[in-house]
Amino acid sequence: MPRAALRKPSPDLDLTRYLKQPEELPETISSQTLFGNDRPLEIEVGSGKGLFLQTESQRRPEHNFFGIEIAQKYAAHAAARFARRELSNAMMLAGDATPLFAPFHAESMQPTLHPRPTDGPPRIADGSLEAVHVYFPDPWWKKRHRKRRVLSEANIRQFSRTLRVGGRMHFWTDVLDYFELTVELIAEIAPELGVPLPETQRDSNHDLDYHTHFERRSRKFGIPVYRVYYRKRA
Ligand SMILES: C[S@@+](CC[C@H](N)C(=O)[O-])C[C@H]1O[C@@H](n2cnc3c(N)ncnc32)[C@H](O)[C@@H]1O
C-alpha cells in the first residue's frame, strides 16, 4: 500500500533541537549526551511519522525517546510534531539505525557512516537502553530481500546487547510470516530476551488514538496485528 505524500514542516518551525543528522551525533548515544540528563532512554527504530514517540514522550516525561528514521522527510515530519509541542524528551535522527547499533570497535561498520567531526562513529553502549521499539517494520516480502529486514539476526543481537537487564524490546507487525520467523529467530539467537509476552489491543477514543500510524491503518482495514514484547533477563 503506497504511503500518502507528506507536507513539509513549516519553515518557521525551528527543528534544531529535535532533528539530528548522523554527523551531528555524539560518539556515545545516551540520555546524557542527547538530552543532558540521566533519564531512561527508549529508542524507536523506523519511527515513520512519529505518532508513537509523540504520544509516549508526553505520557511518560520521566523517560527520553529517540527515534531513528531513515527517510529524511518522515524524520523531519516527526521532529516537527515534537517542536510544535515543545517536547523536551523526544528527538529524531534522520538516518539508518543499523550502523548505530553496531558493537563498539566494529571497524567493519564504519564506512557506512557519514564523516563526523569527532574521532569515532556514534555507538550505543552495552546494557544502556530501557527499551527498543520496532513497529510495523518494512516486510521485504521477497525471500532474496529478507536480509534487508530491520529485525535481522545481526540487529536482534545488537538490540539485545544494548538493552539493560529488565529492559524491553517491543515488536508489532501485521505480517504473520515476519512475526513468526522473528519470534523463532529470537528464541534461537537471543535466549536472554526470554519468552515473548503478549501486548493487548487498546480501544481507540479518537482518530489518532493508536500506537502508530501503521497500527491505525491496519485496524481501520480490519487487518490483524501481532504484538509482542520481551524483557531481557540477567
Ligand atoms: C512501514 S513503516 C512503519 C512506521 C511506523 N513504525 C508505524 O508503525 O507507523 C517502516 C519505517 O521504517 C523506516 N526504516 C526502514 N529501515 C530503516 C532503518 N534501517 N533505519 C531507520 N528507519 C528505517 C522506513 O523508512 C519506514 O518509515
Image (spheres, rainbow, N blue to C red):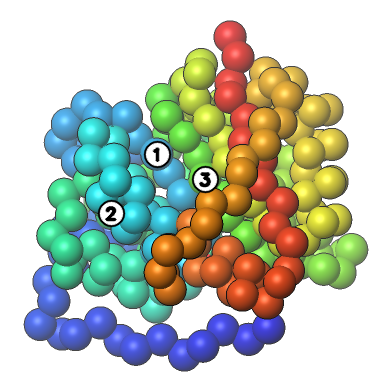
**In the figure, is residue 51 to the left or right of 106?**
left
Check disc 1: other Cα within 10 Å, few if <14, some if 14-19, many if 20+: many
Q: How far apart are marks 2 and 3 (CA)?
A: 15 Å
- Which percent across, then down, holds residue 189? 78, 28
Q: Distance between the residues labelled 3 and 1?
A: 8 Å
Q: Up-down: is 135 above or below 142?
A: above
Quarter of the view holding residue 128: top left
- Whether tag 2 and tag 3 are in contact, CB under 8 A, the answer is no
Q: Which amino acid is tagged 1?
A: Glu
The numbered mark at residue 133 is 3
Q: Quadrant of the N terminus?
A: bottom right
SS type, badge 1:
strand
Q: Which residue lies furthest to the right in this view?
A: 143
SS type, badge 3:
strand
- Which percent across, then down, holds residue 185? 81, 37
- Whether tag 3 and tag 1 are in contact, CB under 8 A, the answer is yes
Quarter of the view holding residue 143: bottom right
The numbered mark at residue 42 is 1
Question: Residue at horizontal 12%, vertical 71%?
Answer: 14
- Which percent across, then down, holds residue 138? 67, 65
Q: Mark 2 points at which residue?
A: 91
Q: Up-down: is 20 above or below 105?
A: below
Check disc 2: other Cα within 10 Å, few if <14, some if 14-19, many if 20+: many
Q: Which amino acid is tagged 3?
A: His
